[in-house]
């Protein structure tokens, strides 16, 4: 999942555009949930808006936060869960909606490259699945039939990250998977989830932020950031109307099951990326009899609230930065940034201070914070990042080349604002789905977390992940609670997770695998996100293909090296 600035601190956490958020029912993982301890405030829960009387007496996985979620793992490398939220595993059962009847066509929905033989259709499904006789929404669906009918074992459906992200999957899924072994044995099924792509879109009006984009905003700006989020939620409500209340993970899972029925299949095989992995886990919990093999790539924590998902990204980025600083500190004779992690990070802070003293310094320092966070995730760019920091120390120093040279060094690290590319409206799925969890209404909860993150997680825009989100100002209540994830009646699957994923904390994958009893494939020494097929990692592809095609799961605790190797620069002699 990729983070894009949605304007002065609003983070689009989507997958390729990507995204993610999540939930899980395990006791050890690395992320958060709706009732987690606020980071840096042991014993002071940053709870969501929730009436204690609504707390269920016996919800699986409900327990009190008992330690700071940002703490280091225990000696076995595990992370303690500190979260819960009330959820449900089943939905209200409405009258069954008639099975849609697809009418396939060779006409694509857009001009993206398509594989010859791909077919397209639209399906009308209930806007509100509890009211099948009511209004409809349209789902755009694509299909590429199995190349070897004699070996065909069914259909494979995939969901990319986001929510609301369009990472070349959706109805373009067949083009992504057509050259893999999957095409031989599966009909490849793509679809644009409700609210996105060629399906019925959920629009939001664009609100142009007023607060300055600053990776370390002063306290005085906090109320302005909050007001921007309030206006953003109002703009979403104006643009989305009644449809907004029916954009949720559970409704996406219901749509998937109607697609299954329309295809005449008893079960589906599933691949999900980031938020899409959570969608797959929800589908298996709601429709266990209809899920066959499943791969969950780059998982969110299965019991984290959306707020916790955002917060845990700060810690995930921080771990990559520490890894980079440790590596750089072992090569002081090459980079000159100091010996050891601490001295290297001191050098980065010195560069940040020098940049802030330049004309336009807040923007320059913000770009550096972003560069350190994003490039430290890519092991292949570690030497480049070290050299950029060293060069900035020179050009930003008194008597140096000045701000233009600083701009050139940081040119790649651009920021993105909605007004740059979206006109007066945009897709509002991210905001709608993230409202399926409770959010704190007390702005001081956010402000306290922002102060903590500003100090401890300055890189990769950490503080912006703690700021108020539209959920603090929600204009509607969810129609139903989130799903309590479980695996009861479908086969054991596979979780793929990089140990340095900056968007979906590694502990989320560990927790998802533990909760569902899936095998865990760990991609080591890697900041990759969304890996299978999309990540150019042949070893991962081989392991996953063997499972999806031949039904052979990897052994427990299987690992693969990341695709991006660290630079081949020897460490200093001791």
Image (spheres, rainbow, N blue to C red):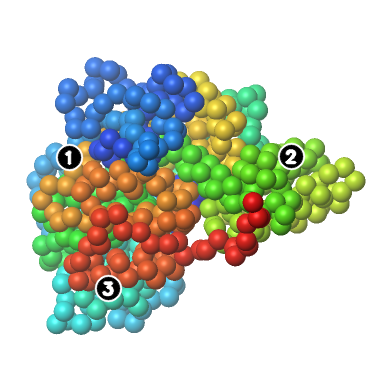
- Element carrying mark 3: helix
Residue at x 22%, y 71% (from the top left corner): 549
**Which percent across, then down, holds residue 100?**
16, 61
Front residue (pair 574, 504)? 574
**Residue 505 pos. (x, y %):** 41, 45
**Going from the N terminus, do you reach mark 2 or mark 3 first?**
3
* In this view, the mark in front (1 or 2): 2
- Left or right side of 458 for 554: left
Task: Evaluate whether residue 523 shows in this view.
Answer: yes
Disc 2 crowd, CA 10 A, few/some/many (<14, 14-19, 20+): some
- Say what secondary structure mark 1 lies in: loop
Of the two numbered discs 1 and 2 on the same chain, state the one appearing first in sequence.
1
Ranked by sequence position, the earlier of labels 1 and 3 is: 1
Q: Residue at x 31, y 37 (%)?
A: 28
Given the current orientation, which residue lies at the most extreme front position? Answer: 574
Q: Is residue 530 left or right of residue 406?
A: left
Q: Examine the image and state in which quarter residue 200 appears.
A: bottom left
Image mark for residue 182: 3
Which residue corresponds to the image point at 41% horizontal and 31% vertical from the top-left? 69
574 w.r.t. 76: above or below:
below
Is 374 placed left or right of 246 in the picture?
right
Q: Residue furthest right?
A: 399
Task: Tell me the number on the disc at residue 118.
Answer: none
Residue that carries the numbered disc 2 in the rendered image: 350
Residue at left 20%, top 71%?
A: 550
Please report contact status of discs 2 and 3: CB closer than 8 Å, yes or no.
Answer: no
| Kind of element beneath mark 2 | helix
For label 1, the residue is 89
**How far apart are the alpha carbons under marks 1 and 3?**
30 Å
Asked if residue 275 lies left or right of residue 210, the reply is left
């Amino acid at each position: 999942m990729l983070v894009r600035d949605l304007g002065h601190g609003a983070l689009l956490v989507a997958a390729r555009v990507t995204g993610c958020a999540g939930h899980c029912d395990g006791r050890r993982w690395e992320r958060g949930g709706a009732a987690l301890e606020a980071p840096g405030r042991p014993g002071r829960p940053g709870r969501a808006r929730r009436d204690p009387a609504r707390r269920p007496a016996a919800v699986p996985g409900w327990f009190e936060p008992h330690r700071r979620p940002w703490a280091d793992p225990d000696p076995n490398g595990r992370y303690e869960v500190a979260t819960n939220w009330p959820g449900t595993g089943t939905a209200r059962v409405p009258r069954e909606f008639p099975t849609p009847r697809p009418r396939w066509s060779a006409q694509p929905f857009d001009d993206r490259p398509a594989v010859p033989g791909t077919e397209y259709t639209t399906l009308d499904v209930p806007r509100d699945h509890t009211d099948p006789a009511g209004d409809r929404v349209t789902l755009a669906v694509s299909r590429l039939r199995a190349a070897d009918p004699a070996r065909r074992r069914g259909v494979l459906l995939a969901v990319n990250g986001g929510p609301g992200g369009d990472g070349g999957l959706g109805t373009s899924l067949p083009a992504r998977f057509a050259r893999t072994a999957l095409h031989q044995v599966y009909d490849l099924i793509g679809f644009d989830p409700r609210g996105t792509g060629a399906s019925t879109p959920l629009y939001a009006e664009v609100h142009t932020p007023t607060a300055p984009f600053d990776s370390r905003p002063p306290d005085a700006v906090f109320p302005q950031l909050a007001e921007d989020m309030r206006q953003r939620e109002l703009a979403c409500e104006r643009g989305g109307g009644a449809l907004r209340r029916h954009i949720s993970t559970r409704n996406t899972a219901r749509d998937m099951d109607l697609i299954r029925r329309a295809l005449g299949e008893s079960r589906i095989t599933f691949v999900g990326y980031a938020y899409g992995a959570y969608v797959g886990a929800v589908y298996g919990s709601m429709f266990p009899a209809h899920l066959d093999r499943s791969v969950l790539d780059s998982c969110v924590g299965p019991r984290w609230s959306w707020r916790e998902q955002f917060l845990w990204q700060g810690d995930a980025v921080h771990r990559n930065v520490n890894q980079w600083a440790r590596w750089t500190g072992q090569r002081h004779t090459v980079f000159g940034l100091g010996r050891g992690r601490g001295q290297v990070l001191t050098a980065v802070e010195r560069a940040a201070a020098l940049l802030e003293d330049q004309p336009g310094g807040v923007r320059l320092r913000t770009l550096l914070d972003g560069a350190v966070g994003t490039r430290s995730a890519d092991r292949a760019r570690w030497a480049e990042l070290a050299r950029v920091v060293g060069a900035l120390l020179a050009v930003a120093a008194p008597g140096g080349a000045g701000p233009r040279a600083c701009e050139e060094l940081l040119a790649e690290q651009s920021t993105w604002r909605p007004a740059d590319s979206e006109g007066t409206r945009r897709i509002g799925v991210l905001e709608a789905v993230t409202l399926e969890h409770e959010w704190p209404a007390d702005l001081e909860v956010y402000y306290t977390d922002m102060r903590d993150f500003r100090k401890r997680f300055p890189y990769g825009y950490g503080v912006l992940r703690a700021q108020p989100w539209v959920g603090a100002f929600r204009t509607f209540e969810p129609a139903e609670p989130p799903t309590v994830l479980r695996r009861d009646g479908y086969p054991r699957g596979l979780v793929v997770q990089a140990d340095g994923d900056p968007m979906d904390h590694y502990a989320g994958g560990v927790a998802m695998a533990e909760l569902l009893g899936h095998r865990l494939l760990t991609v080591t020494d890697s900041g990759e996100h969304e890996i299978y097929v999309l990540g150019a990692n042949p070893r991962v592809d081989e392991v996953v293909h063997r499972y999806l095609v031949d039904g052979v799961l990897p052994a427990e605790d299987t690992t693969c090296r990341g695709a991006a190797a660290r630079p081949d620069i020897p460490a200093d002699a001791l």
